[in-house]
Amino acid sequence: MSRTAALSAAAGGALLWGTIGPVATLFTSDELLPAGGVRLAVGAVALVALGGRPFSGPWRRRDVGPLLAAAVGLAGFQLSYFAAVDVGGVAVSTAVAIGLAPVLTGLWTAVTERRPPSRWWLAGTAVAAVGLGLLTFAGGATVTLSPTGLALSTVAATCFSTQALAIRRLTDHHRDTSALAAIFTVSALLLLPVTLATATPTLLSGRAVMSLLYLGIVAAGISYWLFAHGIRHLGAPAAVTISLLEPASAAAIAALVLREPVGPAQWLGIALICGAIVLTALPDFHSNAERDHLDSGRNPAHSGSAVRRWRRGLS
């Protein structure tokens, strides 16, 4: 897959995530938590329909850790982010949970793979962080600095980063759809007690069912499938930075479709986030996986040592 195609895939997944907020407004506050669990279950079915075969094929003991990490990350992000919003407010929770994830992903990758981050990734992440700050706070949002909210937001960022890194490891050995179908299945099972305990009869209404089908099939199954393509070919740090398009697309949808007010500074924030995505795709930005792949085509002997070093860095 070319860099442009991988960038488009990751951006497409983030844009689809941006539709979650507007669709979530169709649910009552009591329906949101169980709807999240149902979304993951529907997403697992959608990924199977896309060709995923969870737990079939060469699954080995080495895959158990990344699978559990990704599943816990996926479920944990949902729980911790909504809890952070409830305690600390939307503005701060979004800025920390979404904005910190690329930094954590990049730092972890740099430490484990013993390579400094690309300057273009650093520049893109910095520009995206400024854009996210403008988008989140320039609209006059109420800022509540709650220690508990900040802690939960940090947990959410860690969970998102963890799932991206774990997806990267699993897709080294399995098809994207199969790895994701397994992750979603385990994650939905982890959330099953919460889903059953909080489910309400209104989730069976026509409005709720259609919304859940959209959230599960499009905003979970297809979006994560695209996101995994980006991770595989661009690396987790770049793909997670590109995921900052999610709040930008959500704000644009709110302004253009729901007619919510978005000020000039917030539009500037959206533009900065879009510009940051371009920075991460500049020609000399290569993920570690891409570098090893390029090395393998030039020098097979060097390739083996590069792959071994890379694997040792992940172990």
Image (spheres, rainbow, N blue to C red):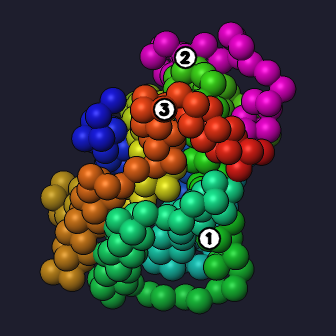
Boundaries of the magenta span: 42-69
Q: Is residue 228 left or right of residue 178?
A: left
Can you give x and y, in whole percent of width and height, for residue 132 in the image? Answer: 36, 73
Q: Amino acid at mark 3?
A: Asn
Q: Is residue 4 left or right of residue 129?
A: left
Q: Is residue 55 magenta?
A: yes
The answer, for residue 62, to whether it is visible in the render is yes
> Callout 3: few (<14), some (14-19), or many (20+) C-alpha neighbours within 10 Å?
few
- Checking the image for residue 268, the label placed there is none
Can you give x and y, in whole percent of width and height, for residue 299 in the image? Answer: 48, 32
Task: Specify the principal SS of the magenta part.
Answer: helix
Q: Quadrant of residue 40?
A: top right
Q: Quadrant of residue 13?
A: top left
Q: Disc 3 or disc 2, which is closer to the eye? A: 3
Q: With respect to residue 276, does 308 lie above or below?
A: above
Q: Is residue 93 magenta?
A: no
- Of marks 3 and 2, which one's residue comes earlier in the chain? 2
Q: Secondary structure at mark 3?
A: loop
Q: Amino acid at mark 2?
A: Gly
Residue at 25% x, 41% y: name it: 4
Residue at 63% x, 24% y: name it: 173
> Callout 1: few (<14), some (14-19), or many (20+) C-alpha neighbours within 10 Å?
many
Report the Cα–Cα distance between label 3 and label 2.
34 Å
Q: Disc 1 or disc 3, which is closer to the eye? A: 3
Report the Cα–Cα distance between label 2 and label 1.
31 Å
The residue that disc 3 covers is 299
Q: Secondary structure at mark 1?
A: helix
Report the Cα–Cα distance between label 1 and label 3.
44 Å
The residue that disc 2 covers is 52
Q: With respect to residue 273, does 40 lie above or below?
A: above
The residue that disc 1 covers is 153
